[in-house]
Amino acid sequence: MHELSIAQAVVERVENLRNERHSSRVSRVVLQVGSLAGIDCTALRQALPLVVENTALRKTEWKIVPVAAKIHCSACGCESQPENCFAVCAHCESADVRIIQGRELLIETVTLIEED
C-alpha cells in the first residue's frame, strides 16, 4: 500500500507549511487526486488518520477531490475524457492524444489557524 508513504509525504509537506507560517494548527486540507495518478483514494483516506495520529494535524479535516482524466487530441483538437487508460479521442478515435489532466496529486488548499 504505497498510499501510506504518499500520506506521510503530504503530511510532512503540510507540517512544513504550518511551521513556515508559524501557525498553531491546520483546520482543513484539500487534496486533488487524478484518476490516472495510480492512487487509491479509499486507501489514502484510511492512511491519513494513521499518519497524523500523534501530530499537530490529528484534528485536521482531510478532503480528497477526485480529478477526472482529460485528453487533448492532436488530430482534431478536441478535448475529452478517456474511458480508460488506453486513451483515444472520443470524437475522431485518433490515438494521437496528450493527457492534460488526471495524473495530479496536488495539495489544493491548506487552511491554517492562528491562535494566541
Image (cartoon, helix red, strand yellow):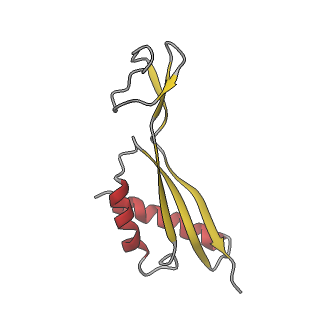
- Asked if residue 66 lies left or right of residue 114, the reply is left
Q: Which residue is at a point 40% across and 67% down the rendered structure image? A: 48
Measuring 39% from the left and 15% from the top, which residue is drawn there?
93
> Is 80 drawn above or below residue 110 in the view shown?
above
Residue 19 found in image quarter: bottom right
Query: Which of 52 and 76 lies nearest the eye of the viewer?
Result: 76
Q: Residue furthest right?
A: 116
Residue closest to the eye, 76 or 105: 76
Q: Residue at x 47, y 78 (%)?
A: 58
Quadrant, the N terminus: bottom left
34 left or right of 40? right
Q: Which image quadrant for residue 86?
A: top left
Residue furthest out toward the bottom: 116
How far across and how far down the image is residue 17, in percent? Answer: 61, 67
Residue situated in front as seen by the camera: 15 or 34? 34
What residue is shown at x 42% (from left), y 65% (from top)? Answer: 8
Residue 107 x/y as whole percent: 54, 56
Quarter of the image containing the C terminus? Answer: bottom right
- In this rendering, the answer to whether 69 lies above or below 44 is above
- Taking 76 as reference, is 48 above or below it? below
Residue found at the very far front of the displayed protein? 91
- Residue 18 position by quadrant: bottom right
